Image: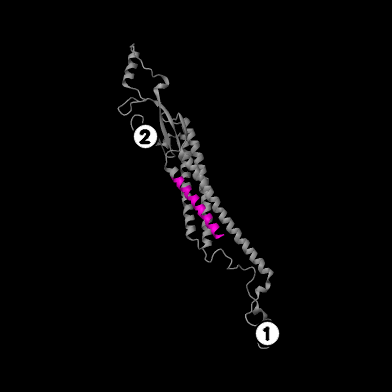
Amino acid sequence: MGRLLMSRDTLSLVLNFLAVSLSATALISTYWCVGTQKVPKPDCTHIRKTDCISSATMEADSNSSMGGGEYSWEMGEDRFTFRSFHTGIWVSCEENITGTGEKCRSFIDLTPVTQQGILWISLVSEVFYHVLLSISFLLMVLELCVSGNPTCGLKLNAFAAVFSVLSGLLGMVAHIMYTQVFQVTASQGPDDWRPHHWDYGWSFYLAWLSFTFCMASSVTALNIYTKTVIEFRQSQKIYKQSLKRRPEGLYHFPGPSIQSISSSVDVFPRLTPNLLIRTTSLDEPDTGESLGDEHC
């Protein structure tokens, strides 16, 4: 039984570690949502030579407007290009179509005013989700360090399970709120940022996978605590029932038998029968049947 509980403790610790790792990765990443934005084509430069508007095309446009014979074939949708972008819970980064690298800006500044309050609640909940999850992980590590004291281990296990449940609830609320905020921002955000096509990125799925591992860890920890408490109470109940069936076990007199005692009454006339009775009653707790030899 001890090995089984130890294996369950290890399983709960591993699940919690995975939840903390995935949560930290999703928290600092910027790939919660990815997609493309429809923007006008930039002018061609020595860095960007394709998917752009060349100076010859611009001259052709001016000649055609003046009655010249040359004109540009790029009309309508051909004058637009698509640039990729990716957004996290903190910043949104876009492809720099006029040069190299990316341009990033705060996602809070892109969010409509009506949704900024919800976004702040989501951000605070996400941070507290990671903090509580980390505290739960530390409690589980500490539980393994005090494995010689079952009482302390059981208390630490209970606190770790509570912190895991609370963090899981906060994480679920944070993820749902962020999804709502991004959908509104995608339809009502600034024109120069509004996506043409978007989808959820790998960071978003990591965040929900972290939530899944968190709830699995909390369920495992609660199962360990509940099973240990039930088994302890059941063992104490069986022990007390065994004492009631054998009341003679409450008497103890080291030395000669009862017959020799009756023959020695004249020698010890003041010896009372109460001295032969053990004072411990059935209602007193038995120190041998406890969860640990030491108090936590």
- Residue 191 position, x and y percent, is 42, 28
Quadrant where the image shows the N terminus: bottom right
Task: Please indicate, yes or no, whether residue 121 appears anywhere in the rendered image.
Answer: no
Position of 295 with respect to 274 (left or right) is left
The answer to which of 172 and 229 lies nearer the viewer is 229
Q: In the rendered image, which quarter is residue 66 located in?
A: top left
Badge 2 local density, few (<14 within 10 Å), some, or many (20+)? Answer: few
Badge 1 local density, few (<14 within 10 Å), some, or many (20+)? Answer: few
**Colouring scheme applied when the structure was drawn:** one colour
Q: As drawn, which residue projects farthest toward the bottom? A: 267
84 falls in the magenta region? no
Residue that carries the numbered disc 1 in the rendered image:
260
Helix, strand or loop status at disc 2: strand
- Residue 107 position, x and y percent, is 42, 36
Look at 63% across and 61% down and name the residue there.
234
When the figure is inspected, residue 250 is found, relative to residue 79, above or below; the finding is below
Q: Which mark is residue 237?
A: none
Look at 50% across and 54% down and name the residue there.
10
Q: As drawn, which residue projects farthest toward the left? A: 46
The span shown in magenta is 1-24
- Residue 290 position, x and y percent, is 57, 65
Look at 36% across and 34% down and name the residue there.
102
Residue that carries the numbered disc 2 in the rendered image:
103
When the figure is inspected, residue 8 is found, relative to residue 253, above or below; the finding is above
Task: Name the N-terminal-most of marks 1 and 2.
Answer: 2
Residue flagged by tag 2: what amino acid is it?
Lys
When the figure is inspected, residue 142 is found, relative to residue 56, above or below; the finding is below
The prevailing secondary structure element of the residues shown in magenta is helix
Position of 255 with respect to 85 (left or right) is right
21 falls in the magenta region? yes
Distance, label 1 to label 2, CA atoms, is: 102 Å
Residue flagged by tag 1: what amino acid is it?
Ser
